[in-house]
C-alpha cells in the first residue's frame, strides 16, 4: 500500500488526526498534486489551528504556484499560531519567507 493510501485509511478512522493529515498533504505535494496538498493543509489548519508546520508548508506550495497574496496570508496566520504556541524557530523561518515575498 502506498503512503497516500495508508494515510487516507488512517484519516478515514480519525479525520482530525493532524499528523496524518499533514503527512497526506506532504505526500500529495511530493507527487506534484499541489491542489490536493493545499486542500489537506487547509483541513489540517481548520481542524488544528495551532499545527504550525501546515501553515509553513502550505505557504511554500502557494509560493511555488506564484500565489503570493495567498502565501502571505497563510504565513501571517502561521505567525499568529507561532505566537500562540511559542514556536520561535518556525516564526523566524516564516518571517524569512514573508521577507522573500516582500
Image: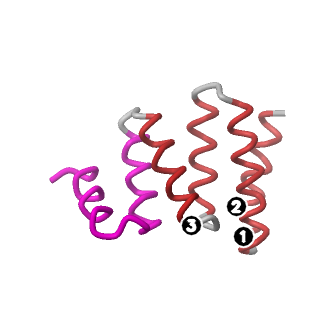
Which of marks 2 and 3 precedes in the sequence? 3
In the rendered image, residue 24, in percent from the top left (x then y), is placed at 38, 53
CA neighbours of label 1 inside 10 A, class few (<14), some (14 to 19), many (20+):
some
Residue at x-position 69% and y-position 38%: 71
CA neighbours of label 2 inside 10 A, class few (<14), some (14 to 19), many (20+):
some
The answer to whether mark 3 and mark 2 are in CB contact below 8 A is no
Query: What range of the chain is rendered magenta?
Result: 1-30
Residue at x-position 20% and y-position 50%: 2
Mark 2: secondary structure: helix
- Front residue (pair 62, 92): 62
Give the Cα distance between marks 2 and 1: 6 Å
Give the quadrant of the C terminus. Answer: top right
The residue pinned by badge 2 equals 90
In the rendered image, residue 84, in percent from the top left (x then y), is placed at 76, 72
The answer to whether mark 2 and mark 1 are in CB contact below 8 A is yes
The residue pinned by badge 3 equals 48
On the picture, is 30 further left or further right than 43? left
Q: Is residue 7 magenta?
A: yes
The residue pinned by badge 1 equals 87
Amino acid at each position: 500500500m502506498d503512503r497516500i493510501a495508508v494515510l487516507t485509511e488512517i484519516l478515514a478512522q480519525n479525520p482530525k488526526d493532524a499528523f496524518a493529515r499533514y503527512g497526506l498533504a506532504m505526500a500529495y505535494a511530493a507527487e506534484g498534486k499541489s491542489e490536493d496538498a493545499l486542500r489537506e493543509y487547509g483541513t489540517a489548519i481548520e481542524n488544528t489551528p495551532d499545527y504550525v508546520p501546515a501553515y509553513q508548508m502550505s505557504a511554500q506550495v502557494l509560493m511555488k504556484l506564484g500565489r503570493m497574496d495567498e502565501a502571505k496570508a497563510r504565513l501571517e496566520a502561521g505567525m499568529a499560531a507561532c505566537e500562540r504556541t511559542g514556536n520561535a524557530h518556525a516564526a523566524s523561518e516564516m518571517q524569512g519567507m514573508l521577507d522573500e515575498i516582500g
